[in-house]
Amino acid sequence: MARQKKRTDGRCQKCFRYNGERYTVYGNTPTEAEEAKIQKLKELEAGVIERENPTLNNYYIRFTEARRDSVKEATLRGQSNQFRKCAAVPIVNGKTFGQLRMRDIKAADLQTVQQAIKAIGNSTRTVNDAMAHINHVFNMAVKDETIDRNPCIAVAKLRRTEVLARDTTHRALTREETALFLETAADMNSYFLPLFKLMLNTGMRLGEVGALTLADIGSRAIHVTKTVTRNEAGGYSIGDSPKTNKSNRDIPLNDAIKSVIKEQRKLNNVLFSKEIKLNDLLFRSPEGKILRDYTVNREIKRITDKCNIEHFTSHALRATFTTRFIEQRPQDYKILSEILGHADVNITLNLYAHTMEENKIIAMKEMNIAY
């Protein structure tokens, strides 16, 4: 029960307890003191609600801060984009998904979000990835006892209906397509021709090539130790580590790779009018800045349009290297996995099982067993 008394200065003082704590408010009149008490109670109740049952938007801030020291900025940026896409979906009474309180969110709300982000043209993979991230958020909320149960459990993944990227923009080029692409790039005097050749001959990711310095080129191997990354604001920089621990690797040099590196060094000398130093980037943008994937992919489209090849992205060059390797040395898939920097050999096998299956069919056709 609140107690009220008049101070010596004439002001009214009102004391009350909330959740075992004592609070005091003041007013020039008893009415003002009562209004101050009501306002204080509202503030206290809002604070308790926010602490014990925060909105999803506010909880996500805590979720992100808790992971900041253990997750790369590029990962935080990508996942934040996924979250914002989901959080903006309208749910009920003018509130968006992100404005709902954690304990009030039901499986039906999540299904609404799932269907809404699919309806605006996102692929089922993009939708499933976004929902998987939301699931991660709710799993953490269960662990820290913000909520009792994860409502994502009741939401099934969407069945994938789109053609896999490995069969379209990430597909392996045929030998004929590869030859025509490189020939056209040369005819068009493409600045990125040495880059294309290196990716085709090493299977390196574009970000790994973009992070190479002359110091990374040994006498016998390319030392892959870092990659181009992006911070939370979207800026590009050279990270201090590759994509995964397994991505830290050596790729043995051969004559074709040595020739490409020599070609790129000559190009740098012509364009930037100086011999690059050991710690300078070997592959850069035409302006001498860090490589950006959209710039390289835009150049690929310019070339494919010219030679009338179905469009692909830079990742297709990695897939092409892998396919040619499997075609020629299928027994060495473990070595291939190490060259690619896959975290697990099963990733290599699962990604390129279709190529191995084709090789198996060809091998059986070529069998000639005398009996």
Image (cartoon, rainbow, N blue to C red):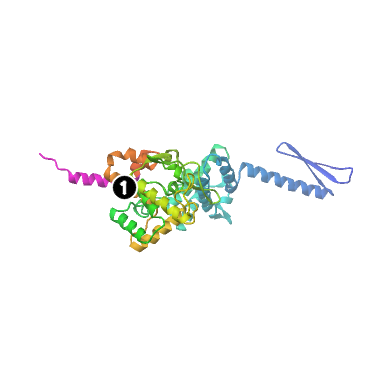
Q: Is residue 362 left or right of residue 66?
A: left
Magenta stretch prevailing secondary structure: helix
Magenta-drawn stretch contains 359: yes
Give 254 or 105, whichever is nearer the viewer. 254
Q: Residue 147: image x %, image y %? A: 56, 40
Q: Residue 340: which quarter of the image?
A: top left
Magenta-drawn stretch contains 195: no
Q: Residue 249: which quarter of the image?
A: top left
Q: Is residue 75 left or right of residue 15?
A: left
Badge 1 amino acid: Thr
The N terminus appears in which quarter of the rendering? top right
Give 29 or 302, whichever is nearer the viewer. 302
Q: Residue 103: which quarter of the image?
A: top right
| Numbered range of the magenta stretch | 351-371
Q: Residue at x 45, y 38 (%)?
A: 245
Q: Residue 90: image x %, image y %? A: 54, 56
On the image, numbered disc 1 is attached to which residue? 323
Could you tell me if residue 69 is visible in this image? Answer: yes
Could you tell me if residue 2 is visible in this image? Answer: no
Q: Residue 225: image x %, image y %? A: 45, 41
Q: Residue 89: image x %, image y %? A: 53, 55
